[in-house]
Amino acid sequence: MTRIVGIDLGTTNSLIAYMDGQTPRVIAGRNERGMVSSVVAMTDNGLIVGDPAKEHLVRNPERTIYSVKRFMGKSLEDVSEELTYFPYKLQEQGGVIRIQIGDKTYSPPQISAMILRELKRRAEEHLGEDITKAVITVPAYFNDSQRQATKDAGLIAGLDVLRIINEPTAASLAYGLQKKTQGTIAVYDLGGGTFDISILKLKDGIFEVLATNGNTYLGGDDFDRTLVNLLLNEIREQHGCSLDQYPDQMQALRLEAERAKIRLSDEQKTMVVLELPSGHGVFRRQITRDQLEGLTTALVEQTLGPCRLALKDAGLQPAQIDEVVLVGGSTRMPLVRRRVQDLFGKVPHSELNPDEVVALGAAVQADILSGGTQDMLLLDVTPLSLGIETMGGVVSPLIRRNTTIPASAKEMFTTYVDGQTSVDIHILQGERELAQDNRSLARFQLKVPPLPAGVPRIEVMFLIDANGILHVTARDVRTGLTQSVEVKPSYGLSDEEVERMIGESFKFAAEDLKARQIIEARTEAEAIIKATEKALELGGHLIDSAETTAIKTALAELQAARAGDEHRGIRARIADLEKATHHLAEVLMDTSLKEALQNKKLSELT
Ligand code: AMP
């Protein structure tokens, strides 16, 4: 069986982990560090990835890319307010951000792939085998295009990304919380540059994201900055030296401040020693933990507001949280731990290394996927969209892929033919536009009383429960008659098949869309033609002959357009016919017929 690795592709640091028997382990590089800095430098001597690239941040800022995760799956407009933070150049091509380095441009997935390749290389060296399959984590708030961009990065790096999972879900898995089967979990993640709080609900071993909040520009770097500012002032006052003029010394001061901050998580006091530029001597300063806490209290307080908001969105009180998990290096600060403990009223989990916990959880998920751990089902999102077939063989999706489960959705449909006595509910799974290209899950019929087309209201409801079972119910709103079915969408579906189905939806996207547009336009045209003919039959004598002629002309033009394959042309003729029949519809007293003419917006069932 091929091994699947778990990857935490972070904003500042990335890690790769695997299952060593029953224990997840992070793979360290030659320097013994498990983390690879998420930094890429394109130097004259070639590409440098990870910690060594960090040295180029000061010397070569325009060719050294960091924080690329912030740009994944985004357009330039999405990040316009953040651009001032970055020294490298960004531009847009076809709605996608490109990062300019020298005379070349790179997409964020391409840059992320460089980091992934470094992780892959590390794992291959350590394990002595090819690594081709991975689970990659993303923040819980990542949308579809950000998740897709992450998958693309994997693909570019030569990795088959079997699953994208939420970082807080991974952290919970690392602590084995899924074994508790029930409960609510708060995952507090304070890294170097970002803060995320996620509230999860665990039911039957499945994680559902109830709420997320945070601050994408708050983290350990801000803590360092408060200390740097204090030291800069003191150096200026005591040594008459403005360090901001010396980029190398500034960088040294930043690193020194960060190291002092880290030491103060274990010690009560520490010394900062810094050699100043020529002639200014050496700066020495003792700092206590109390002093650091005084400087950073306001920043830690800034994380608590989002925690309260997330709790509110989840409809929970702090006391209703069963488990609190700490993620990110900055949660090693005793002040952070105290404040989180105060807020939730319980001791947070901190036994595992907070820098590693997400990667470790990704390895646990990878193990579950590879069949290593068989006692649980882990579906925290629906891998493929679920919907029903509507007139003309097109799909109307109700639950989109990557929706966290349990999930539900409701939509109203109507009939296509006059006097139709039943509707066919055909449940489909997949990403393609036409029913025939998707996976058929189930089919049933609902009886409806014979009425003119477009009049019945049929409500279709989809519900995927925590066990991944899909319950579909169709209800005739007028009669209250219902019919339902239960299916297991994951039944007999392998990860490879999911991959293939998603892949094909991209491959055929343009063709599919075209086919769908033409089918929908034709279906709508047919319904309107039928309704108009009927309206003329019933009410033709109530309007004058000029109006009748205008309607007949519009009708003939729509019929001609319908035979072609230009959906825009058909739509334009539909609009013309609607305009021409507007008065007739008003004149017609039969309200049901009026509905038939006017309520063409609902999709019809066969
Ligand atoms: P991450 O992005 O999760 O790797 O977090 C990195 C951040 O955690 C950086 O700002 C580090 O300075 C900070 N950090 C790492 N270890 C400690 C520690 N022992 N005490 C305080 N902050 C730490």
Image (spheres, grey):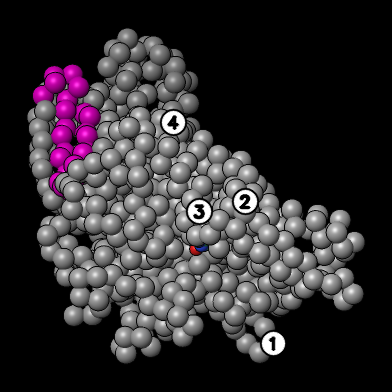
Upstream in the sequence, badge 2 or badge 1?
1
Upstream in the sequence, badge 4 or badge 3?
3
Measure the C-alpha gap from mark 2 to mark 1: 40 Å
Q: Where are the magenta residues, as a range?
A: 458-481
**Looking at the figure, which quarter contains the C terminus?**
top left
Which class describes the residues within 10 Å of circle 3: few (<14), some (14-19), or many (20+)?
A: some
Q: Residue at x 90, y 74 (%)?
A: 279
Disc assigned to residue 44: 1
Q: Are marks 4 and 3 in contact (CB under 8 Å)?
A: no
**Looking at the figure, which quarter contains the N terminus?**
bottom left
Marks 1, 4: nearer the viewer: 1
Which class describes the residues within 10 Å of circle 1: few (<14), some (14-19), or many (20+)?
A: few
Viewed as shown, does residue 232 lie left or right of 138?
right
Q: Which residue corresponds to mark 4?
A: 577
- The amino acid marked with disc number 4 is Leu
Viewed as shown, does residue 242 lie left or right of 407?
right
Look at the picture and state if 334 lies above or below 263.
above
- The amino acid marked with disc number 1 is Asp
Is the residue marked 3 within 8 Å of ligand 1, measured from its CB?
yes
Residue 461 in the magenta stretch? The answer is yes
Q: Which residue corresponds to mark 2?
A: 292
Q: Secondary structure at mark 4?
A: helix
Measure the C-alpha gap from mark 3 to mark 2: 10 Å
Marks 4, 3: nearer the viewer: 3
Measure the C-alpha gap from mark 1 to mark 4: 66 Å
Is the residue marked 2 within 8 Å of ligand 1, measured from its CB?
no
**In x, y percent, where is residue 338?**
45, 44
Upstream in the sequence, badge 3 or badge 1?
1
